[in-house]
Amino acid sequence: MKPVYAITLFCIITVLIACAGCAGTAPRTTTPASVAVTTTAPQAPVPTQYPGALDLNQETPFGIAGTNGTATVYRAEIRPTYSWASPSYNSPHEQQEAGSSLLATQHGYNTEKPKDVNTFLFVYVRLANTGSERMVVPSPNQFVVDYNGKTYSYSSVRGSDVTVSNVRVTQYDYQIGRGGVAGSIAPGPSNAADGFLIYEVPASLDLSKAYLVITLDPGHQAAWKLG
């Protein structure tokens, strides 16, 4: 065989082998990577502790057995401390009975301080008798502050003659006759029990999430939003 034919044949064979290799190779395909899709379920609304809670200054009626009245919570304020005076406590006799270690009898205002990380919450209430007969009204123990699912009872001042600085009214229970025990009020707006109750609460308390809850009579409980 002549050299030129041999070279030509070799080239043809090489090309055929290359083409055969190309024909036998499957084309590569790429599968797109799966993309993880995260969906966030809509959050259920947080249920309101007292869905029918009243705003400050809103009245609600109450009463049984033919006696009728109205109740309202008209103000709430936070006080880190408060100053108070009492003629009886400031007397030498009362201070001696209280075991005061003061060097001399103190007159004027005293400063009340809460426990660490606490503060004072003053809540102002007004209960009026709208009927024609004297009516029994709730004791202060039936007025409870509810905050974040925890309840707080009121803290009483020392006596009926206590006055608190910059507060024009006295403690509610001393206006119903028996200082802490259920009492009564006569008919008429001028006889309304208009006073304050003091609660020692966490210093972090948010008034917009706090309520004053009152058991007004055996069949009626009411709640007020404090902020």
Image (cartoon, rainbow, N blue to C red):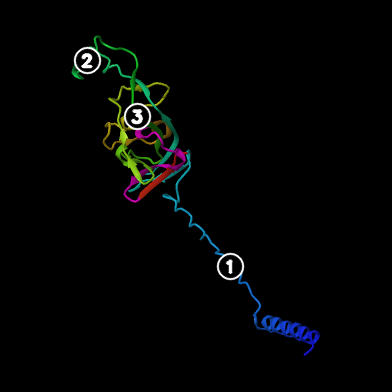
Give the residue pinned by disc 3: 171
Q: Quadrant of residue 5?
A: bottom right
Residue 146 located within the stretch drawn in magenta: no
Identify which amino acid the numbered label 2 is placed on.
Ser
Give residue 101's mark: 2
Residue 227, how many percent across, how many down?
Answer: 47, 39
Give the residue pinned by disc 1: 33
Classify mark 1: helix, strand or loop: loop
Residue 86, how many percent across, how many down?
Answer: 30, 19
Q: Residue at x 34, y 29 (%)?
A: 171
Identify which amino acid the numbered label 3 is placed on.
Gln
Residue 63, how many percent across, how many down?
Answer: 36, 46
Q: Which residues are magenta?
A: 195-219
Comparing labels 2 and 1, the label whose residue is closer to the camera: 1
Distance in Å between CA atoms under marks 3 and 1? 72 Å
Q: Earlier in the sequence, mark 3 or mark 2?
A: 2
Of residue 197 and residue 44, the one placed in the foreground of this image is: 44
Of residue 55 and residue 176, the one placed in the foreground of this image is: 55
Classify mark 2: helix, strand or loop: loop
Q: Earlier in the sequence, mark 2 or mark 1?
A: 1
Q: Are marks 2 and 1 in contact (CB under 8 Å)?
A: no
Q: Does 205 sit left or right of 139 as displayed?
A: right
Q: Quadrant of residue 67?
A: top left
Residue 208 located within the stretch drawn in magenta: yes
Q: Is residue 192 visible?
A: no
Of residue 199 and residue 133, the one placed in the foreground of this image is: 199
Distance in Å between CA atoms under marks 3 and 2? 27 Å
